Amino acid sequence: MSLAVPVPVSATVLAWARQESGYAAERVAKRVGVKPERLAEWEQGGGQPTMRQIEALASFYHRPLSLFFQPKPPTLPPLAAEYRRLPGIVPGHESPEMRFAVRKMSARRETMLQLLVELGESTPVFDLIAHLAETPAAVAERLRAALAVGPDEQLDWSSEWQAWAAWRAAVERLGVLVFQFPKVPLAEARGLSLLRTPLPVAGVNPKEIPESRAYTLIHEVVHLMLAAGKEEVPAAREVRDNDAWAAVERFAEETASHTLVPEAVLAQEIRSGGFPRNGWDIGDVRGLARRFKITPLAMATRLRASGYFDWNHYQGWKRGWEAYVASLRPKSGGFAHPVDLTLGRAGRPFTQTVLEALASNRITVVNAAHYLDLKAEHFEKLKGALLTRPGAGGDDE
């Protein structure tokens, strides 16, 4: 078949694929190289795209080519039935990047469940719950104990990257899949969670700096605990108004803060470090934040919550910090090896399970490459990274 000959495909499927992927017609038309009017004709049955154009649409929508030759669209549950409510995101109106991220993480979770059955392995159980009637400090104490990260271990971490890798590994041991979702703007989502069991998912935006990723991750774990306690439901069924939801978010924020910086450890570090040295200025807060491998802003928020300075001091400090950050020159992005990208996005448990299934002949090399978004030529390096780097999975783009 010539790639330039129009191919009969369902107009309904064409329209569904674009709308379900969240793209405006103008953006798709520009990508495919046609006028918006031509795309509208295809979706209304007044014309047919060529094979080359169908392939371009499939690639842009991240859909299998075979979909476009079906007589009607598939019936799928709404994406918002998967993820927790996110501030500023209206269910059904997610950006194309967000929609793809949720689909990708959900597909990896389903793949993981299937492979565990194929390998005859048990599925990890996430059994932590939380209730809004509890205090954030009490929930944080329980979560910190389950994570089994001791204060001495935390304070001995040599870098923010080591801290991120350690927190991620600790969360994965709880029976949570930790994925990273690239290409979604930070303004849209820093983190999200898929409220599915077993194997719930905590997703972190890799555009976050490493000091922020641990906070975002623990924040999402708290939402998973609330969902397990029947305090939350997926966004499609969430009916609380904005004020009520803001209270849930504050609970998760405070719990995450207490988890990363327990009260007793904070007090000890303040005493031993002789803080405040300069009236809790930017230098004081940065110095203490470095001890816990979190951002200065997160530390300032934590200090205010524990009464080390009042709201007025916090507001003034925050204005000074924002001015300082604005004065910094942005760092240029570096190159990440495909193996690092895979470990960062897919996580150690998922990656290891895929490689075990491949070694057991449960899946093909083609399957494994598809699941991991990695060419087979990199598999040996990937295996080596899992063996020699216990905390592998910290880097991304």
Image: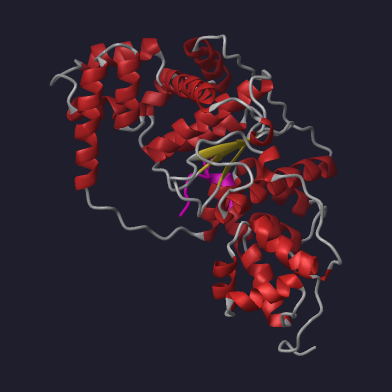
Q: Quadrant of the C terminus?
A: bottom left
Q: How many marks?
A: 0
Q: Is 55 rendered above or below residue 264?
A: below
Q: Nearer the viewer, residue 275 or 120?
A: 275
Does 155 sit left or right of 104 as displayed?
A: left
Quarter holding residue 27: bottom right
Whole-percent x, y for residue 32 in the image: 60, 76
Quarter holding residue 116: top right
Magenta stretch contains residue 299 = no
Q: Magenta span covers which residues? A: 384-397
Does 76 sit left or right of 155 as displayed?
A: right
Whole-percent x, y for residue 237 in the image: 69, 32
Q: Residue at x 69, y 55 (%)?
A: 371
Q: Nearer the viewer, residue 103 or 53?
A: 53
Residue 205 seen in the current view:
yes
Q: Is 164 rendered above or below residue 7?
A: above
Q: Residue at x 52, y 39 (%)?
A: 191
Whole-percent x, y for residue 377 in the image: 62, 66
Q: Residue at x 55, y 23 (%)?
A: 147
Q: Is 159 rendered above or below residue 107?
A: above
Q: Is 57 rendered above or below residue 6?
A: above
Residue 63 seen in the current view:
no
Whole-percent x, y for residue 65 in the image: 75, 69
Does 336 sit left or right of 170 as displayed?
A: left
Q: Quadrant of the N terminus?
A: bottom right
Q: Residue at x 67, y 36 (%)?
A: 236
Quarter holding residue 187: top left
Does 34 sit left or right of 302 as displayed?
A: right
